[in-house]
Amino acid sequence: YSEASDYYQSKISGCLSGQLEKNVSYNEEFYKNLKIFKKAVKSSPEIPTNYKAIGDFYYCKERKIKALDWYMEGIKSNPGYNYKNQNMNYLRLRNLIKRTQNRTIEKRYKEFIDNLEDEYPEEAKRLTKKGPDISDWIKSDLNRIVQTVEESDSNLMLLNYHPIPPPTN
């Protein structure tokens, strides 16, 4: 399991951040590690983290419907899971819906939410609630900075740093 986790961290997580590494290939190693996570789900079906990992494998392989299924299963496996206040399947599912224009996925997502609302209304809200718009936070912060600078009669210098690329193996 630790080897599969290392593989996931080094290969799959880059795909999710939009930085699909060129060295991720869908070969025997990919499927071997995917199978390990599937075994983990069978041995500990109440731990949603393994479902998320499997969903991420399929997401990176552009199999969005399979990813959707695993994320939904991860939520159903333990809807109120609260390890470090996160069941990442909620976040992954919301991101998949935002990034995918697919009627089948949208339909299944809505059906899933309807079913979840019947049994777990609080958990269903985690998928349907709209969080604050990030741009509102930025505008608020910038307004506060401008106000502070004006009140203190000081100067402000803004710098833009280049993003740091991920390390290569």
Image (spheres, helix red, strand yellow):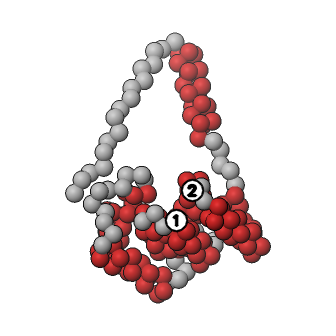
Residue at figure coordinates x 63%, y 36% from the top left: 136
Image quadrant of residue 34? bottom left
Residue 21 at x, y percent in the picture? 32, 56
Which label is found at residue 41? none
- Graded by Cα atoms within 10 Å as few (under 14), some (14 to 19) or many (20 or more), the crowding at tag 2 reads few
Seen in the image, is 74 located left or right of residue 26? right
Residue 10 at x, y percent in the picture? 31, 62
Q: Is residue 79 above or below residue 155?
A: below
Residue 78 visible (yes or no): no
Extreme residue in the right direction: 118
CA gap between label 1 and label 2 equals 8 Å
For the residue labelled by badge 2, is the local secondary structure a helix, a strand or a loop? loop
Whether tag 1 and tag 2 are in contact, CB under 8 A, the answer is: yes
Which label is found at residue 100? 2
> In what quadrant of the picture does the N terminus appear?
bottom left
Residue at figure coordinates x 61%, y 31% from the top left: 140
